[in-house]
Image (cartoon, helix red, strand yellow):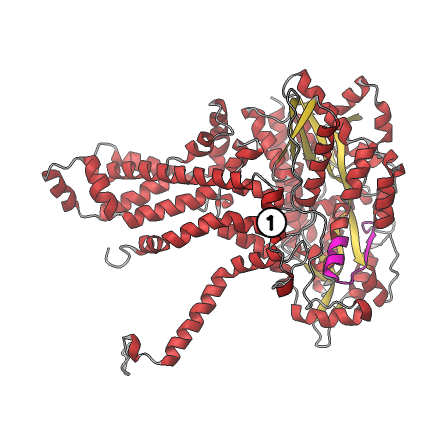
Amino acid sequence: MSNNFRVMSLPALAMTMMVAACAAPTAAPAPTQAPAAAAPTAAPATAAPAAVPATPVPAPTITPVPLVAQPAGSTKVVFWYGLGGQLGNVVRQVVNKYNQSQQKCFVDPVFQASYDDTINKINASLAGGGLPNVAQVFDAGTQRMIDTKKIVPVQDLLERDKLTDVLDDLEPAVRGYYSVGGKLYSMPFNSSTAMVYYNKKAFKDAGLDPEKKIWSYDDVAAFAKATTHKDAAGKVDRIGIAFSRGGWFVEQQLAVHEQLLVEPGNGRTERGTKFVWNNDIAAKWFELLKKTIDDGTGRYYQNAADPQAAFVKGEAAIHFDSIAALRGIVGGVESNKTGVDVGVAYMPRLPDAKGRTIIGGASLWLTTEGGKELQDCGWDFMKFASTSENQAFFSSNTGYYPTRRSAYALDDMKTALAKYPQFQVAIDQIRSAPASAFNSGGISGTFLPSRLEVEKAQDEFWSGKQPTAKAALDAAAKRANDLLDEYNSTLKK
Amino acid sequence: MTAQKPFPRNGSGRSRATVVIQYVLLVAASLLVIFPLLISISVALQGPVVAPNLLPTPGNLDFGIFAQVFRDEPNLARWILNSFVVATVVTMGVIVTSSLAAYALSHAGFAGQAIVLFLALGTLMIPFEATIIPNFLFISSLKLRNSFPGLIIPFLGSGFGIFMLRQYFLTIPRELYDAARIDGCSDIRYLFSILAPLSMPALATLAIYTFLNTYNQYYWPLLITDTTEWRTTQVGISIFRSAEYQVFNAQMAANLIVMLPTLALLVLGQRQLVRGLTAGAVKG
């Protein structure tokens, strides 16, 4: 019974989800005190203390979009994707648009529960058969996908079809991430990047500049201190920073400070053989956040979903998140009437930093599964999904930015930018330095386990199990490298 | 401990205060147990909000979400059916294979019995993760992906079931077996007509345990099914989980819907379950 936590009983599963759902209200000290805090900061007209239950607002469709049926005589292409909920809906809309646009090919989208499960299923299917024709795989799966040797590099197809102008139209940061050895391997589909989200209202109230876009580490500490708010009884009713473990954010720190994640050269020109993220920059980032825990201006949440909820509710002034969460966060603030004024800024940096963040998100991979007909149909769908029109559609309905630069000229995108000006900050951020090996991001066959090791190190340091950040990072890097060595040794056969 | 004061044993003599306190404690305990269920109902009814409150606003309940979940994911009913069929067949299979094996291991007295028992127990020591890929390759090579057999076959034998039933069968007096044999009863008849009815608590416990475990499987159904209609509930409902941004109402509504069959089973089988767990606990 204890040998597999997946098999835990449904009530237990539900209970876990409940904890996820309600941990934020219970974790925050004295949730009933929150209205008292929100009231003084909110303008009288819009004051909506948290105790007044939120009115459910007809928000964008959360449940899945029904799919269109397959026309007779068409070629069926299997497409695996890992985005659920509202974002998954938009993926299905793109698929529906494709299926309605022509009769020759039919894309059958199969939801694979998450990005992680998608790559796990691909790994299992390599031996057992049944690979999809097209798969949406997240950034960390890049090297693994190449190593399967069951994929068709996208650049070969673009060159074959004389579509190299598509390459030039790709957002340079995005093209950089999915290129290895100068060759684009997968078709960028949904791209994001890491941002600081902050409550402009709390900043104004604390007398801080609510428009500052580039923060130093000292700023982070100072802003967290200034925005931490106590109620009359002396209890913290708004914490400065809310954060959880996040290996992805550590990767951003290394890129911003032009440090490698993997040697040699972030795995971009030859295979990565050693993780080197256990350096001073990562340690400083760990220590910056640890300091906020220690002086009571930051709160470390065990549950990764909680900082976001705390930020939306106005219980935290600063929060790190993907730009892909922007629409959800802004929508959540509106529907909950929490009075938070959502601002976004670049990931914090030390004064001499010259780099920029890496992208996140996922891309579409074409596999060698099936014959030429299936590959042609799969490729046709991938081209469709990455046109400027569809990228503008996808972006304006999610929080991802377009992978194509020409998409910004389209009306959908202009409307989205006008409604969500925060978007522009993310776009500026990924354009703030030319593409380099540092900001292309590190790739390796075991990148996901490595990311999890970074998060384990964070937990050990922040919860006090390891005395120093460096010690926690070194121990984690040792484990990550053992795994990478093992992975690489299996490839030499 | 010596009780000095006379303590009334029957209800009529019990003081009213004691009864009230007992009920208050019982209500508190049951609220605690049912809390996850209550909060999922609460969250489901609050609409698509990111930070749900503990309690919904009474005038503003979104009951439509339960119908919406079925409307937007037409396969949900099919998923529940899949899970139900798989869990039922696996449960019946495990009961049959486990009781036959346990009977042989407790009554047959053949050479190498201990080795067979240890082999069965040994399967408990191997984590499921270690066998999942070989199982996957095997089932794939039999072309049983996206089918009920593929979902069912790997789980028809259970080391835990064999061990549990063997231990229970051993507690049934041997004299019963001898008497039955003298009267000309065959082994199969003894097992199904005499031993099985006497072992109802153990069988019911095993059945409920197996049913719940199978119903809640995640990784195996995810691997072995590639098409939306062959998914089981636990894999299927992950489609209601939002990526990047957490909105819980549809997720909770779907959870509640798929929880109903197991909940019904628990209510119906609770008596057997409790009896099974404590049977023989005192008197041996």
Q: Which chain carries label 1?
A: B
Give the image quarter of residue A34. bottom right
**Which residue position holds label 1?**
B251
Which residue ends up furthest to the bottom in the rendered image?
B5
Which residue ends up furthest to the left in the rendered image?
B182
Given residues B142 and A181, the one toward you in this image is B142
Report the side of A94 relative to B102 (left or right).
right
Find residue A290 and report its horizontal and vertical position in percent.
71, 58
In which quadrant is the C terminus of chain A drawn?
Answer: top right
- Asked which secondary structure carries label 1, the reply is helix
How many numbered marks are there?
1
Whether A343 is among the magenta residues is yes
> Can you say whether A75 is above or below A473 in the image?
above
Q: Give the range drawn in magenta.
A: A330-348
Which residue is at 30% across, 34% downward?
Answer: B116
Find residue A349 and report its horizontal and vertical position in percent.
83, 50
Find residue A114 and report its horizontal and vertical position in percent.
63, 40
